[in-house]
Amino acid sequence: MKIGYHMFIAMTTTSSSTATMDSEKVQQFMGKVLSDFGGAASLILAYIGDKLGLYKAMSDFGKPISSEELANFTGTSERYIREWLANQAAGGYLTYDASSRKYILPLEHAQALVNEDSPTYVVGGFQVMMSLCRDEAKFLDVFKTGKGIAWGDHDKDLYQGTERFFKPLYTANLVSSWIPALDNGKVEQRLKQQNSGGLKVADIGCGHGISTILMAKAYPNSKFYGFDNHTPSIEYARKKAKEEGLGEDRIQFEVASSTNFPSPQQEEEAERKEGGYDLITFFDCLHDMEDPQGAAAHALSTLTKPDGTVMIVEPFANDKLEDNLNPLGRMMYAASAMVCIPVSLSQNGPALGAQAGEAGISKVVKAGGFKHFKRSAHTPFNIVYEAKP
């Protein structure tokens, strides 16, 4: 028996139990649920497409491709590839030519699925979603107990997926618009200075070091320090910095928390250099921390006065919950429930969440001792805040 989309909706909304029920609204909701089912299942197949290089192979092939050709090209099973292609076409990721029975990866879609240098490259998100699926038992437990999940206790795909997801956003905006917006352009100007030796910059919660490395490459006259409490991430960042040709005279990564990272005096004691950090950055991490107010206070204590600046990059969020009830807010609240909140609660933190908003972040930063706080820039996905003593 064949059941089409509309028949499925009709079958699942037939009810006589409530005379006042709006059947059209029920059908609309069931259509949404069916779409979510398809999207959730297809995320797994998109992850497979990335891991097996199927999207890249289609892009490299450069013309419409059949299931047989893609299977041969990638050394995979044609029968599975045939079904994968059909799913991807049904979801709009690929287009299908019925006359030739071949599939096309549109150039525009390849920017999101293949081109790692594109600001719209999103495949890291598939990796993050798969990591969350694997952690399902942990989520069930913390929802019942109120406990947390430390960052290092998540599935390992979360770390690389986060790096791959955020890197395009940082590459597109960090040097071109976010840093130039700080202190009316004065921070960027000082980062570029040659005579004074540039600035000392601390990147807190640096993870795999994407943001730290991007800044170090853009501003060769300044010195950068990346700190994170996740040892495997710091080890990865050190290796990545070497691959990028950055020596320890330019960039250093150390294991430290947001409330005990060393001052530059401690870091450079052998050279007897004085002064605090000129710029301290938090990229998509302050809301995750066990003590964000303490992190702000410690940043203030290690900052040069009065010219030091703190840059805080946070997920885009409005202050009112009702203003975040949209597709971006949906994604952010989901990530918050499974990553941000558990990480903070794992160390008895306040669990600010990924949608803390400008008012929430301002309150934390000012409670940490900063007198000046403002929004410096924003994109559809992030808000950049600036704090000064």
Image: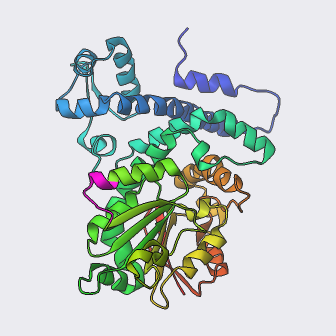
From the viewer's perspective, tell me whether residue 369 is left or right of residue 274.
right
Quarter where residue 64 is shown? top left
Q: Position of residue 362 (x, y in %)?
A: 61, 76
Instruction: Please name whichever residue, 63 or 199, is drawn nearer the observer in this view of the structure.
Output: 199
* Residue at screen point 44% across, 63% down: 226
Rendered location of residue 274, percent (x, y): 43, 85
By what rule are the colours in the image chosen? rainbow
> Residue at 82% of width from left, 33% of height from top?
18
Q: Is residue 118 above or below residue 174?
A: above
Instruction: Between residue 107 and residue 61, name the one nearer to us.
Output: 61
Residue occupying the point 34% across, 83% down = 185
Spot the residue most to the top: 1
- In the displayed structure image, the side of residue 257 where residue 127 appears, left or right: left
- Tell me if 70 is positioned left or right of 88 in this view: left
Q: Quadrant of the N terminus?
A: top right
Q: Quadrant of the C terminus?
A: bottom right
Start-end of magenta stretch: 241-248
Look at the magenta stretch and give its main secondary structure. Answer: loop
Identify the residue at the far bottom of this view: 306
- Residue situated furthest front in the rendering: 270
Residue 155: tell me if it is visible: yes
Residue 172 rendering spot, x and y as whole percentages: 32, 61
**Quick check: 329 above or below 32?**
below
Residue at 30% across / 70% down in the picture? Answer: 176
**Residue 277 in magenta stretch:** no
Using the image, determine if residue 44 lies above or below residue 309: above
Quarter of the view holding residue 190: bottom left
